[in-house]
């Protein structure tokens, strides 16, 4: 295999020749039956012989020092096997040199709930009960438990993933503009709140560790666990066969994974650890709160003259991540004067980190609100204003777009939704008590080209077996990987077996950044290309003269079962890597979001009545699972606009509402009729299979469409998410 990144986009020719007809189709999830019948086993469901249960002991102050720990009562509690808190043999620093939330036994408390150790018992309940008996005294120190956006703002933080943009003279351009918007927005903390708990079963066989865990990234997690424990990565096997959601919160490994491994070694038995729901607020990263100032200027005709998005995020002193607030805005609109900045304020809280669509999920709201405000100011239809300011090339870097069908998304969306942008006067449509409004916004998510590899094996039985370490976190990986192989090798989908999420399988970058599907599907396609070459040789033919269909190879007048051609078991390893050409392009997924809301003029209750999105995400691998991804994102958009708000107690640094009882997300009753449509154009720059990001696209712009619709219904311009009744009620027009 040639590992050098290609200098030209490579489009596997088999993609254009294949006739099986499954790729892109709305194929049911191949793992669906296992999931609904309970056959799919998740990390906490492995019952290895002798398994013990661990419970993380959390600090009950937000900042300070532990002065005394007394675990005697806990050790004497029923069912307790061990309490690991004050044993000199324990590693003194598991922070890995950089991640303080990985500190398992530290006496320096940096945030509420930080691990002080672990109780191991013969049941979860016994471990949890005993953890409550551990006596801890503290020297409490004052902490910064709220993001103070007015003081000590650090510009250009070194860790920022998007570099600041400063082109032209913003102030002068705004001063000379016919219309100017200058608005400030605040977004709260969001929790990734995956349904499956953060859970791990750890077991040792001699010096070999196996971690069965709920993780988005297998190879990366293997490295982190090994580095944290100071052992060779080859001695660590990570298995994540089924993952019940992660939403960014499982992109790294949490301290409970390391604690499970240490505890299993200590007690000489497998140990399972799951975080209780309330612990996830403390031991899993959250989406940073932000303040964002938007300034946009335009000439009288509506052409943007200046655009600035200046954001401030919050982060603790150690985590090397800064919410990339303007990431998606940078390439979005034309305009000569441009300024996009990310600053940070420091807090004494658990880390903020990547939560579904870091950057766009919260950055898309202010910019899409400001564009809506500008349209009102100019008296131009917001759809027309966006089309008018659609750039021909990346307006910041000048690079060509790989593929960009945003204008088609606007037009198709407006047509299907029945958008009428002619009268945007707010508060004019009423149905009894209800004020009705419509709103729209752009959706965009930067697309990443990353490395991935996958093995495809053809068996004498005419089946294909695929292995890759990319997990399926609810996205549909099992299904799309099977579809690619079935399509290219001409096999019924039932003849493909997919094995995922194991560090013994070929490496991918994991399920993150919405790069999982495109990269892994490309690796599978490249492996299939190689197998097709061999099959063609064995048919004394060429790939272009051979047809693969329904388990047979057909060339000339011969039709041979593929299993017969693979009698010795054919195998190929496909590897994709971003070509050297990738850096010459600006690439993203796009979309247009439309929403209709009804706001009760008496109570302030908001009901989203319908939503519609049209999306450009390159080749669609599976219309059903892609649609589900976009639906899920759009529903999160509703939750962002109306419900989600993680609250921290300003006196203790404790999350007040980290469980599903109190952290309100959009649920079924909040999700209206939602339509998803695609504008499909394969993007050969993105990756060989031409598939762009889907997982994080649907959330982008969705909340903005909702709040723009609320403005149209009521005249209330939201400046704080979520738009709760108390915020809206005082701003409603008179009855
Ligand atoms: N897909 C498609 N056509 C494409 C791209 C994707 O049909 N061109 C479909 C496939 O079904 C694929 C899925 O969309 O499995 C997601 O693909 P992709 O956009 O590549 O995203 P990843 O596989 O990298 O998954 C991670 C992504 C991220 S970063 C977050 S956060 C997120 C998301 O997916 N978390 C999720 N969607 C989630 N969905 C569920 N159910 N649970 C989560 O935790
Ligand atoms: Mo997604 S936040 O990149 O896991």
Image (cartoon, rainbow, N blue to C red):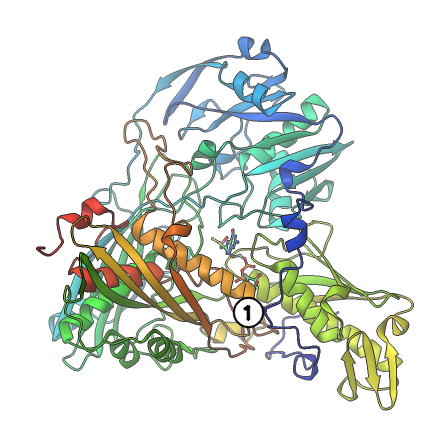
SS under mark 1: helix
Q: Position of residue 224 (x, y in %)?
A: 60, 42
Q: Position of residue 476 (x, y in %)?
A: 59, 59
Residue 267 falls in which quadrant of the image?
top right
Q: Tell me the residue that label 1 is attached to.
A: 623
Q: Residue at x 69, y 67 (%)?
A: 524
Q: Is residue 543 above or below residue 115?
A: below
Residue 706, visible in the rendered structure: yes
What residue occupies the far left of the structure in this picture?
734
Q: Is residue 276 above or below residue 418?
A: above
What residue occupies the far bottom of the structure in this picture?
556
Q: Residue at x 42, y 26 (%)?
A: 109
Q: How many marks?
A: 1
**On-image quarter of the C terminus:** bottom left
**On-image quarter of the N terminus:** bottom right
- Left or right, 355 with reference to 176: right
Q: Position of residue 678 (x, y in %)?
A: 47, 74
Q: Is residue 316 above or below residue 322?
A: above
- Left or right, 718 with reference to 6: left
- Left or right, 535 with reference to 180: right
Residue 94 falls in which quadrant of the image?
top right
Residue 399 falls in which quadrant of the image?
bottom left
Residue 359, visible in the rendered structure: no
What residue occupies the far front of the structure in this picture?
432
Q: Position of residue 592 (x, y in %)?
A: 37, 71
- Left or right, 578 with reference to 637: right
Q: Residue at x 23, y 68 (%)?
A: 372
Q: Nearer the viewer, residue 355 or 634?
A: 634
How many neighbours does mark 1 have within 10 angstroms: few (below 14), some (14-19), or many (20 or more)? some
Q: Nearer the viewer, residue 280 or 164?
A: 280
Q: Is mark 1 within 8 Å of ligand 1?
A: yes
Q: Residue at x 79, y 73 (%)?
A: 531
């Amino acid at each position: 295999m040639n590992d050098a990144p290609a200098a030209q986009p490579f489009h596997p020719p088999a993609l254009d020749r294949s006739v099986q007809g499954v790729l892109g189709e709305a194929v049911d999830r191949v793992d669906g039956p296992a999931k609904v019948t309970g056959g799919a086993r998740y990390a906490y469901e492995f019952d290895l012989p002798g398994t013990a249960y661990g419970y993380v002991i959390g600090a009950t102050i937000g900042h300070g020092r532990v002065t005394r720990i007394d675990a005697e009562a806990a050790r004497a509690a029923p069912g307790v096997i061990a309490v690991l808190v004050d044993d000199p043999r324990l590693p003194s620093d598991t922070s890995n040199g950089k991640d303080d939330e990985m500190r398992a036994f530290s006496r320096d408390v940096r945030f509420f709930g930080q691990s002080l150790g672990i109780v191991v018992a013969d049941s979860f309940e016994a471990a949890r009960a005993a953890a409550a008996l551990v006596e801890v005294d503290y020297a409490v120190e004052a902490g910064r438990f709220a993001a103070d956006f007015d003081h000590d703002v650090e510009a250009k933080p070194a860790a920022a993933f998007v570099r600041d943009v400063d082109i032209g003279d913003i102030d002068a351009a705004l001063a000379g503009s016919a219309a100017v918007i200058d608005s400030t927005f605040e977004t709260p903390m969001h929790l990734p709140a995956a349904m499956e708990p953060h859970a791990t079963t750890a077991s040792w066989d001699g010096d070999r560790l196996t971690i069965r865990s709920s993780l988005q990234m297998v190879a990366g997690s293997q490295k982190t666990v090994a580095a944290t424990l100071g052992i060779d990565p080859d001695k660590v096997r990570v298995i994540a066969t089924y993952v019940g959601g992660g939403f960014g919160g499982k992109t790294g490994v949490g301290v409970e994974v390391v604690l499970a491994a240490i505890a299993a070694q200590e007690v000489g038995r497998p140990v399972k650890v799951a975080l209780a729901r309330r612990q996830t607020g403390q031991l899993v990263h959250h989406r940073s709160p932000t303040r964002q100032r938007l300034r946009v200027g335009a000439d009288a005709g509506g052409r943007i003259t200046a655009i600035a998005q200046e954001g401030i995020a919050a982060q603790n002193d150690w985590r090397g991540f800064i919410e990339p607030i303007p990431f998606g805005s940078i390439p979005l609109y034309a305009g000569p004067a441009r300024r996009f900045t990310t600053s940070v304020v420091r807090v004494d809280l658990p880390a903020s980190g990547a939560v579904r669509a870091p950057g766009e999920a919260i950055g898309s709201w202010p910019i899409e609100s400001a564009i809506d405000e500008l349209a009102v100011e100019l008296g131009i239809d917001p759809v027309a204003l966006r089309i008018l300011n659609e750039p021909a090339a990346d307006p910041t870097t000048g690079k060509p777009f790989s593929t960009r069908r945003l204008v088609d998304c606007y037009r198709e969306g407006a047509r299907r939704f029945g958008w009428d942008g002619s009268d945007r006067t707010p508060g004019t449509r009423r149905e009894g008590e209800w004020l009705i409004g419509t709103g729209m916004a752009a959706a965009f998510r930067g697309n990443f080209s990353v490395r991935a590899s996958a093995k495809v094996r053809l068996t004498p039985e005419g089946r294909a077996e695929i292995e890759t370490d990319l997990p399926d976190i609810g996205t549909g990986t099992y299904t799309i990987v099977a579809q690619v192989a079935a399509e290219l090798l001409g096999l019924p989908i039932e003849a493909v077996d997919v094995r995922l999420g194991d560090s013994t399988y070929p490496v991918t970058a994991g399920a993150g950044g919405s790069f999982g599907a495109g990269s892994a599907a490309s690796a599978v396609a490249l492996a299939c290309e190689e197998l097709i070459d061999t099959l063609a040789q064995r048919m004394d033919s060429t790939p272009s003269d051979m047809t693969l269909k329904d388990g047979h190879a057909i060339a000339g007048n011969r039709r041979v079962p593929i299993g017969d051609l693979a009698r010795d078991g054919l195998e190929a390893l496909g590897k994709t890597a971003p070509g050297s050409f990738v850096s010459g392009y600006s690439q993203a997924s796009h979309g247009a979001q439309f929403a209709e809301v009804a706001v009760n003029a008496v109570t302030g209750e908001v009901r989203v009545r319908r939503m519609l999105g049209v999306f450009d995400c390159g080749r669609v691998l599976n219309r059903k699972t892609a649609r589900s991804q976009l639906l899920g994102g759009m529903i999160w958009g509703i939750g962002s606009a109306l419900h989600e708000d993680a609250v921290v107690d300003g006196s203790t640094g404790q999350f007040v509402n980290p469980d599903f009882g109190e952290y309100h997300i959009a649920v079924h009753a909040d999700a209206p009729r939602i339509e998803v449509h695609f504008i499909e154009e394969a993007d050969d720059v993105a990756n060989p299979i031409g598939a762009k990001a889907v997982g994080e696209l649907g959330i982008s712009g969705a909340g903005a469409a909702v709040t723009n619709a609320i403005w149209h219904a009521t005249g209330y311009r939201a400046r704080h998410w979520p738009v709760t009744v108390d915020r809206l009620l005082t701003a409603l027009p008179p009855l």
